[in-house]
Image (spheres, coloured by chain):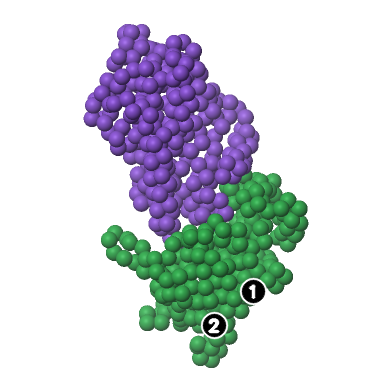
Amino acid sequence: MIETERAGRTFKVRGAVVHAVRDLSFRIEPGEFVGCLGPNGAGKSTTIKMLCGILTPTSGRVRVAGLDPSRGRTALARRIGVVFGQRTTLWWDLPLRDSFELVRLLYKVDRKLFQVRLDELTEALDLGGFTRTPVRQLSLGQRMRGDLAAALLHDPEVLVLDEPTIGLDVVSKAGIRSFLLRVNAERGTTVLLTTHDLGDVERLCRRVLLIDHGRLAFDGTVGDLMATAPGQATIEEVVTRLYTRGRAAPPPVEPV
Amino acid sequence: MVRTYALLAWTWTRAAMAYRASFVIMTVLGVFITATDVAVILVIFSHTTALAGFTRDEALFLYGSAGLSFTLCDMFVSNVDKVSQHIKAGTLDTMLIRPVSTWIQLAADRFALTRAGRVLQAAAVLGYALAVLDLDARRLWMVPVMLVTGTVIFAAVWTLGGAAQFLLTDAPEVINSFTYGGGQLTQYPLSVYGRDLVRGVTYVLPLAFVNWQPALYVLDRDDPFGTPGFVRFLGPVAAAVLALLAGLAWRQGIRHYRSTGS
């Protein structure tokens, strides 16, 4: 469903060439639920943007749902759903339901199908209370639920989420997580998400990709990930170990 | 494409209608602001009967035709020059994940029906000039041709300006001097300007084909700068070439888009 082959992306920053992502190869099968981890600036967002066609890779090959994202960007858009945790894809000044209606028209979703889908999503994400509110007045949790609904209205085969739980409280997080599991289980939607929240990984992902310095540093199940550290290490300890390989680890914070 | 544009434009219009008083004020203000341009022309002609060889009504014909093309573009296309704003805000990313043209989404973004006031004002001036000038009916076919040509040229200039911002995120001010500057330049007979400038807007950035060259044909005038007669008919060619270049530049811009850090 998602395939990258030695994919790379460089940026020129004041004359110097920066490799945001290099030699990235992985394959995600239909129906998988994959989490992508990595320290800040590791290249996670760049990878996601290459998968959606926003950024053109400078080397290698990327295929999503059988398409080259940067060449077939608009065709691909009908088949994937994209959510950015840090910014909304909804229309800021419009009420939520107007955004949904625009999505229906832009994605040419059949009116009846759309209504069925919208009712399901409204119920599953509990949107009922705020569909008439302009997006800019929504709380972060509400906005995130709205974004998720908008990304799924056209029933995409793949759902790509860049930090979907960033800044959310525990209850909102739990709601989003159970919703994502449901979408993956009931509709067989392939899900790829990036996150810094290891709870997301533990509760959601069967498989983990770890990107560091633009390269794939780990690819395996959560069990495999835990097995990289000896003994009874927690997932935080395991990931810290992987992030700090070859670097000095930050000193542990003593509990107060 | 037209359907997508209409959808987005209608959505923005509905959102703007929520503030009805502001909507009315903006529309009326638009008419008044552009009307000052006409006032300037009328003031000039209250002191003289000819401006660089053109009568008042001929000057109004030039003003109205370029003005109509320009205001139509200002209303329907000009938002494509907001590329750098959208890059900085990260909103370009969200347009790129939609299954419709990014150019259309940008052009329709925050579509303002209030700009229709300016279009109507320019159309009224053109209508007046056509009514009072004693034009050769066999040459009038050129009027719609020049309006389309002018609109395409201005749209292409705006698109080039937008495309340039994929590379130069801080270029909007420079780009304004080509778009709004072009709009101002074409309001007067080009014979008021220096020869080098007119050469530049004929052979480099073909603003002379927005109204000047075709209008010389409609008004049955020789070019004060001495270009041969066939140049009057080159407008559509110039517009097509410029539009093609703009389209290519736009595609390159999208391919070289760098997005933001997060």
Say whether residue B176 is visible: no
The residue type indicated by label 1 comes to Gly
**Chain A visual colour:** green
Q: Which residue is mark 1?
A: A31
Q: Residue at x 65, y 52 (%)?
A: A108
Question: Residue B34, percent across and down?
Answer: 45, 23
Q: Which residue is mark 2?
A: A220
Q: Residue at x 68, y 53 (%)?
A: A109
Shown in purple, the chain is: B
Could you say which quadrant of the image residue A20 lies in? bottom left
Question: Residue A86, percent across and down?
Answer: 53, 59
Question: Residue B195, percent across and down?
Answer: 23, 26
Could you say which quadrant of the image residue B40 lies in? top left
In whole angstroms, how far apart are the C-alphas of marks 2 and 1? 16 Å
SS type, badge 2: strand
Q: Are marks 2 and 1 on the same chain?
A: yes
Label 1: chain letter: A
How many residues crowd around disc 2 within 10 Å: few (fewer than 14), some, or many (20 or more)? few
